[in-house]
Amino acid sequence: MPDDKQKVYVIRHGETEWSVSGQHTGMTDIPLTDNGRKSVKLLQPILAKQSFALVLTSPLQRAKETCQLSGLGEQAETSPDLVEWNYGEYEGMTSSQIHENDPGWTVFVNGSPGGENPEEVGLRADRIIARVRAVKGDVALFAHGHILRVLGARWLDLPAMAGRHFLLDTSTLNILGYYRGTPAIQTWNAPLF
């Protein structure tokens, strides 16, 4: 039985040059922009009021930097399961560029050639969820848009492809929890400013 009082703070990293341009940023390890750094610092007073039994971050610098600037960097462990979707051949491309050759493509349905499919990303999300649910107390997760959208779907026992229904901007705070023992979303895509 899950801890009904547990809250999972899910934070998408701050803005990067590729998030502004709409390029798919999976394994490319790029930093936050100055605007991204400024916005994620707004997390400090919010997260300082909380106590976390576990803090996990993607190993990619944009997530690690977001975690550090939010004030939880010293407490964080890196988890390869929180890395962004591997876009394979579509890494660095915008959706418009991809649709020129693959008009009906969506990562949540089709996956990426040379990269991951939705089920593989869903398995990573399931491992994170199992780790979170084994912890007594609140948890903070710092990661990326598509993996976190899949995590939100899997939290609710929906298929990984249902992540397409959970929009997620950069520099947002999301809170997962429970309603009478049932996994629920308390807050989603809440801007910091």
Image: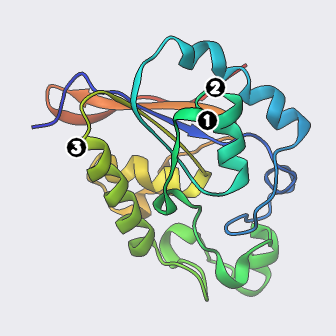
Q: Helix or strand or loop: what does disc 3 sit on?
A: loop
Q: Helix or strand or loop: what does disc 1 sit on?
A: helix
Instruction: Check residue 73 in the rendering and tell me which mark sits there, or answer none.
Output: 1
Against 128, is 1 above or below?
A: above
Instruction: Check residue 44 in the rendering and tell me which mark sits there, or answer none.
Output: none
Report which quarter residue 6 is drawn in. Answer: top left
- Residue type pointed to by label 3: Ala
The quarter in which the N terminus is drawn is top left
- Residue type pointed to by label 1: Gly
The quarter in which the C terminus is drawn is top right
Q: Of label 3 and label 2, which has the lower sequence position? A: 2
- The residue at the point 41 percent across, 74 percent down is 120
Mark 3 touches mark 2? (CB < 8 Å): no
Q: Of label 3 and label 1, which has the lower sequence position? A: 1
Name the residue beneath numbered marker 2.
71
- The residue at the point 46 percent across, 61 percent down is 81
Of all residues, the one furthest to the left in this rendering is: 1
Mark 2 touches mark 1? (CB < 8 Å): yes
- The residue at the point 14 percent across, 31 percent down is 181
Q: x and y percent of residue 87 in the render?
A: 64, 75
Give the spatial CA distance, label 3 vs label 2.
Answer: 24 Å
In screen coordinates, is 98 left or right of 156? right
Name the residue beneath numbered marker 3.
134
Against 49, is 24 above or below?
A: below
Give the spatial CA distance, label 3 vs label 1.
Answer: 22 Å
Q: x and y percent of residue 73 in the render?
A: 61, 35
Q: x and y percent of residue 40 in the render?
A: 72, 29
- Residue type pointed to by label 2: Gly
- The residue at the point 41 percent across, 57 percent down is 162
Q: x and y percent of residue 114 in the render?
A: 61, 88
Report which quarter residue 12 is drawn in. Answer: top right
